Image (tube, helix red, strand yellow):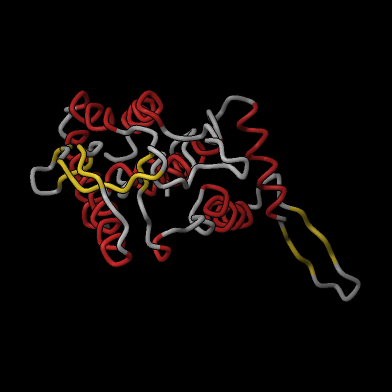
């Protein structure tokens, strides 16, 4: 699965680096909003409406192209877009990867159903990425249906909330920390000073002050968004 995902994004990056933007955009036209895994279902049993969808996927790749994040090396893997591309969160990343690895999930589902004696129905699949032809394809496969709805089983080992790798944690633990250290070295206007009773002097700068300053710069139009700041700062460093 990992190799298939990397193969897909490598093809996207190849098109973008060679200025074949329309071909890169076309690859994202096959990003439907997958419901077969039920990972986007709310507690009430309804879809949460936060999926990627074809139109949203097109906007995502256009933003990647506009940002030049691939050419500059900031975005090297598909998971990097949740850090640097606006309007992309873990749910949309999950949708995109589900489309890419759909054939692997179909094979896993068939394997489990054969183990447990669950009947399958032969039908045409939705598109999935073929790393051999490096293109989207479909095939006739044995699929799992329940009450008229196709289902894909997903190994629990690969399901994650992506709690550690996101824009918020990257910004707070790395970028803001680095920005604070830089401002301390430069003794910027944000740096505070205090002198203790024992005569010891200290220059300090709370991270929350740096974060607030970044927020003010975004409001003043210096950056388009928080992710835009992260992207520009990462390019600079």
Q: Is 151 or 166 nearer to us in this picture?
A: 151
Q: Position of residue 110 (x, y in %)?
A: 25, 57
Task: Specify the farthest residue to the right.
Answer: 197
Residue shown at 65%/52% (left/top)?
Answer: 187
Q: Position of residue 74 (x, y in %)?
A: 35, 46
Instruction: Classify residue 163 by image quadrant.
Output: bottom right
Residue shown at 70%/42% (left/top)?
Answer: 212
Q: Is residue 234 depicted above or below 22 in this figure?
A: below
Instruction: Classify residue 235 by image quadrant.
Output: top left
Q: Is 99 or 55 nearer to us in this picture?
A: 99
Task: Specify the farthest residue to the left.
Answer: 133
Instruction: Classify residue 146 by image quadrant.
Output: top left
The N terminus: image quadrant? bottom left
Q: Position of residue 221 (x, y in %)?
A: 58, 25
Residue shown at 55%/56% (left/top)?
Answer: 178
Horizontally, is 56 left or right of 226 in the view?
left
Q: Position of residue 51 (x, y in %)?
A: 46, 35
Q: Tally the marks.
A: 0
Horizontally, is 28 left or right of 135 in the view?
right
Q: Is residue 228 depicted above or below 211 in this figure?
A: above
């Amino acid at each position: 699965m990992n190799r298939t995902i990397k193969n897909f994004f490598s093809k996207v990056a190849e098109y973008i680096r060679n200025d074949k933007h329309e071909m890169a955009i076309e690859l994202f036209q096959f990003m439907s909003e997958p419901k077969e895994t039920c990972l986007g279902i709310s507690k009430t049993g309804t879809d949460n409406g936060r999926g990627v969808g074809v139109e949203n996927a097109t906007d995502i790749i256009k933003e990647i192209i506009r940002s030049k994040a691939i050419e500059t090396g900031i975005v090297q893997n598909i998971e990097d877009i949740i850090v640097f591309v606006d309007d992309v969160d873990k749910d949309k990343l999950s949708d995109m990867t589900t489309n890419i690895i759909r054939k692997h999930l179909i094979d896993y589902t068939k394997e489990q159903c054969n183990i447990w004696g669950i009947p399958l129905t032969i039908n045409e699949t939705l598109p999935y990425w073929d790393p051999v032809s490096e293109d989207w394809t479909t095939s006739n496969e044995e699929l799992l249906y329940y009450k008229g709805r196709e289902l894909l089983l997903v190994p629990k080992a690969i399901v994650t909330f992506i709690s550690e790798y996101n824009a918020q944690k990257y910004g707070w633990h790395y970028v803001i920390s680095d920005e604070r250290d830089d401002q301390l070295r430069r003794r910027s206007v944000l740096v505070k000073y205090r002198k203790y009773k024992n005569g010891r002097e200290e220059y300090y700068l709370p991270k929350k002050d740096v974060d607030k300053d970044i927020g003010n710069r975004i409001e003043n139009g210096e950056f388009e968004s928080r992710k835009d700041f992260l992207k520009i700062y990462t390019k600079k460093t």
